[in-house]
Image (spheres, rainbow, N blue to C red):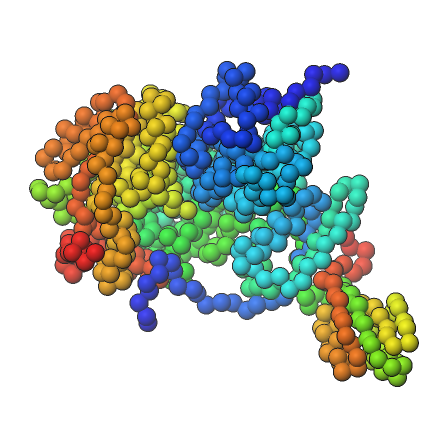
């Protein structure tokens, strides 16, 4: 008879067979048997976070920058509930996570035992699937299936809840089988007819635009290469969602910038006026579409997505191609090569129009010699870091949009931001995860002072594991995006959006055992940024920026793409008077 | 037009609502009903009735029948979302007006009253082929199997005739003819 292993041993045997190198976690009563086993498995390194939400976001950062699933280990009750935000975040942004949670022993389930909660009940709506392991014999199979579910199709988080007695119980171990499709869930169901229909639309179009999303990134680095080949071959303008940045080079002439609520003038107008819209791996999110009834009214719409439920969910499309982005685009390119006349000629007028829109310079801002403009800070950061392979994470708010607008990404998997859920506090722990995956690369969290305080404790994690992450705080003393909405839509009633009593971030950095740098005027910005980059260790950079600056351009809610508010350069009445503080 | 103050878009005009019946084959495992029902409540879909039972004990398969209303787009979305659930094997969906599908619901009706009243009740539901499950001198329990609206009409009618308690199932469905979905 083969050897019997305890549940805790089986957890690690599964992780080893799934080539897991790192787990992000926090111990507690109901996972102690698993933690006890950790010492016997040298190929797996545990990263101790300071809060379970941090473990989840760190695993997200790890997954998004490496393409491998992130693994989280937490205890029952509060351990599991603390990780819910990160699971939901991963679910919204399609990040593969495997979360293992401890549970009270089987015989105590349902008795309101100490640190008991209905973990599978709570996480059911924020995971692709979850399991409560009630029989030790099921454990190996469930764990392997968990990895399969998390990483196939549209990726996402899964959770396996393991009661403490199951962790002690013993059974045989079985290796992962080459998984068959679970319940006949197929992902590449496109036909050659659909590809030909797309080619037909491409060849007829006079005003096309390509709109890419996170699906391209999730399809792997090869998909980005294929996309570049495809887009260059057909010569169409390309725009991207927040999550898709980096799939196509941000400094390429064919790239017309990000689209949506804070997208460029040219991207949004192209979306509105086009006659052919090719959506590749994006989901027509409400931040992208604006008013649905007036969304891209004149176009034929094509949607390429691996998730059938994304098709026609929000916008009805004329041609749907369900499949993996890379495989679909490969098939398209194959057919394109046979196409005799390219329609680059036909679309030259369209490009002229786009150039006209470009001259609006919608990302422009009025720079200052006295105060640091946040956009300027991001631009300087970009200029001073673009010579190396830099990974950027962000928190959520104005700084996130400025980062998306002014930092140009040339490679996929270099940009980690919470887009779907919009989780403040995402960036710092995500940077921890990114740095774990890429120990020798520069990792910068472009942050806001309000967001960063939500998961500040993870600086300890960075210090403990010598992770030289750089926290670049655009400090405007406000919850900037909230303040901006209040200014524009709530008659400047700045209700609770000003943070009094902010900590001294330099001293805070020192208290955590890392380096603190403060920049207060534009003159010292470059030197200080260089100092940050060159410092070999974690840094908190407190960049004091103009507190009244707003993020433009902007599509107000309920408005179509061609009714954007542009920045102060374009319209005098949009100029901010900067009396925010007095109104608090 | 009022100024939009929300961070979200304004709702767009709604399409016509239709009633549809979903038949879902699932693994009979803990929590599977919660997953299906949670999908409906979480995404704001409506459940008019629900019926579920295991239909194959060797393969461990249950069949869930859900009656719901929605625009064609929503119905489509429900189907696609259901198919994504890991324990779901197959999803079929029919319009309530579909002539090729039989829909049935069952009801148990308890009538209390004198002999005359009971006779009157039985006569009233004769068209629905009532089955008498229990009878005493002053009461009767009737089982009827019919369409939802037929049961609705009947229970309304019997209210004044001594109907004191009604128990109903959700609808179940089966295609006509030799065709198997």
Residue A303 lies, in percent from the top left, at 47, 48
Residue A274 lies, in percent from the top left, at 35, 54
Viewer-closest of A198 and A33: A33
Residue A262 lies, in percent from the top left, at 29, 50
Quadrant hosting residue B58: top right
Left or right, B132 with respect to B91, comes to right
**Image quarter (top left, top right, bottom left or bottom right) of the N terminus of chain A:** top right
**Image quarter (top left, top right, bottom left or bottom right) of the C terminus of chain A:** bottom left
Left or right, A408 with respect to A339, comes to left
Residue A375 in view, yes or no: no
Viewer-closest of A525 and B76: A525
Relative to A73, is B44 above or below? below
Relative to A540, is A545 above or below? below
Relative to A95, is B164 above or below? below
Viewer-closest of A88 and A54: A54
At a point 63% along the width and 50% down the height, the residue shown is B34
At a point 32% along the width and 70% down the height, the residue shown is B2
């Amino acid at each position: 008879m083969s050897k019997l292993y305890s549940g805790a041993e089986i957890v690690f045997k599964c992780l080893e067979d799934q080539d897991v190198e790192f787990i992000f976690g926090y111990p507690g009563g109901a996972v102690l048997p698993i933690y006890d086993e950790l010492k016997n498995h040298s190929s797996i390194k545990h990263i101790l976070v300071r809060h379970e939400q941090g473990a989840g976001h760190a695993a997200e950062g790890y997954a998004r920058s490496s393409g491998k699933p992130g693994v989280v280990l937490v205890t029952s009750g509060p351990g599991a509930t603390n990780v819910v935000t990160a699971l939901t975040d991963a679910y919204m942004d399609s990040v593969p996570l495997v979360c293992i949670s401890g549970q009270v022993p089987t015989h105590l389930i349902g008795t309101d035992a100490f640190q008991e909660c209905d973990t599978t009940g709570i996480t059911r709506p924020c995971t692709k699937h979850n399991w409560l392991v009630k029989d030790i014999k099921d454990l190996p199979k469930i764990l392997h299936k968990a990895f399969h579910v998390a990483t196939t199709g549209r990726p996402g988080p899964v959770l396996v809840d393991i009661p403490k007695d199951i962790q002690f119980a013993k059974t045989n171990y079985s290796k992962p089988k080459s998984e068959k499709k679970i319940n006949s869930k197929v992902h590449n169901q496109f036909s050659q007819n659909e590809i030909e229909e797309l080619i037909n639309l491409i060849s007829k179009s006079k005003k096309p635009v390509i709109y890419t999303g996170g699906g391209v990134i999730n399809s792997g680095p090869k998909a980005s290469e294929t996309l570049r080949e495809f887009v260059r071959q057909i010569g169409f303008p390309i725009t991207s969602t927040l999550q898709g940045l980096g799939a196509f080079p941000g400094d390429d002439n064919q790239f017309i910038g990000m689209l949506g609520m804070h997208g460029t003038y040219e991207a949004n107008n192209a979306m509105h006026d086009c006659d052919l819209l090719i959506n590749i791996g994006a989901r027509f999110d409400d931040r992208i579409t604006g008013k649905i009834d007036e969304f891209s009214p004149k176009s034929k719409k094509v949607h390429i997505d691996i998730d059938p439920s994304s098709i026609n969910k929000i916008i009805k499309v004329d041609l749907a191609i369900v499949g993996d982005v890379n495989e679909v685009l490969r098939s398209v390119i194959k057919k394109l090569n046979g196409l005799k006349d390219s329609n680059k000629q036909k679309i030259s007028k369209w490009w002229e129009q786009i150039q006209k829109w470009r001259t609006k310079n919608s990302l422009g801002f009025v720079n200052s010699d006295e105060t640091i403009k946040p956009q300027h800070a991001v631009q300087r950061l970009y200029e001073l870091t673009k010579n190396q392979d830099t990974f950027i994470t962000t928190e959520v708010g104005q700084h996130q949009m400025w980062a998306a607008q002014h930092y140009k990404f040339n490679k996929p998997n270099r940009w980690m931001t919470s887009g779907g859920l919009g989780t403040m506090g995402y960036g710092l722990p995500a940077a921890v995860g990114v740095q774990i995956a890429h120990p020798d690369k520069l990792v910068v969290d472009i942050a806001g002072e309000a967001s960063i305080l939500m998961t500040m404790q993870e600086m300890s994690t960075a210090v403990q594991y010598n992770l030289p992450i750089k926290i670049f705080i655009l400090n405007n003393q406000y919850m900037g995006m909230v303040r901006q909405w209040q200014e524009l839509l709530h008659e400047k009633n700045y209700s609770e959006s000003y943070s009094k009593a902010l900590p001294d971030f330099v001293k805070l950095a020192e208290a955590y055992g890392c380096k603190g740098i403060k920049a207060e005027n534009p003159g010292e910005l470059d030197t200080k940024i260089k100092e940050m980059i060159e410092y070999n260790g974690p840094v908190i950079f407190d960049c004091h920026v103009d507190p009244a600056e707003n993020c433009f351009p902007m599509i107000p809610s309920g408005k179509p793409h061609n009714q954007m508010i542009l920045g102060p350069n374009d319209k005098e009445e949009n100029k901010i008077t900067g009396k925010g503080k007095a109104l608090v | 037009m009022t100024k939009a103050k929300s961070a979200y878009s304004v709702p767009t005009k709604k399409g016509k609502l239709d009633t549809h019946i979903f038949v879902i084959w699932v693994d009979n495992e803990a929590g599977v009903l919660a997953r299906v029902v949670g999908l409906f409540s979480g995404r704001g879909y409506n459940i008019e009735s629900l019926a579920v039972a295991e239909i194959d004990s060797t393969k461990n398969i249950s069949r869930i029948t859900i009656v719901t209303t929605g625009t064609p787009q929503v119905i489509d979305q429900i189907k696609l979302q259901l198919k994504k659930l890991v324990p779901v094997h197959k999803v079929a969906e029919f319009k309530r007006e579909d002539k090729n599908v039989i829909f049935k619901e069952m009801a148990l009706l308890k009538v209390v009253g004198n002999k005359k009243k009971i006779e009157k009740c039985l006569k009233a539901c004769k068209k629905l082929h009532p089955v008498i499950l229990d009878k005493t001198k002053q009461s009767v329990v009737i089982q009827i199997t019919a369409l939802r609206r037929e049961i609705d009409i009947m229970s309304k009618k019997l209210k004044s005739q001594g109907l004191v308690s009604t128990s109903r199932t959700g609808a179940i469905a089966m295609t006509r003819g030799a065709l198997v979905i």
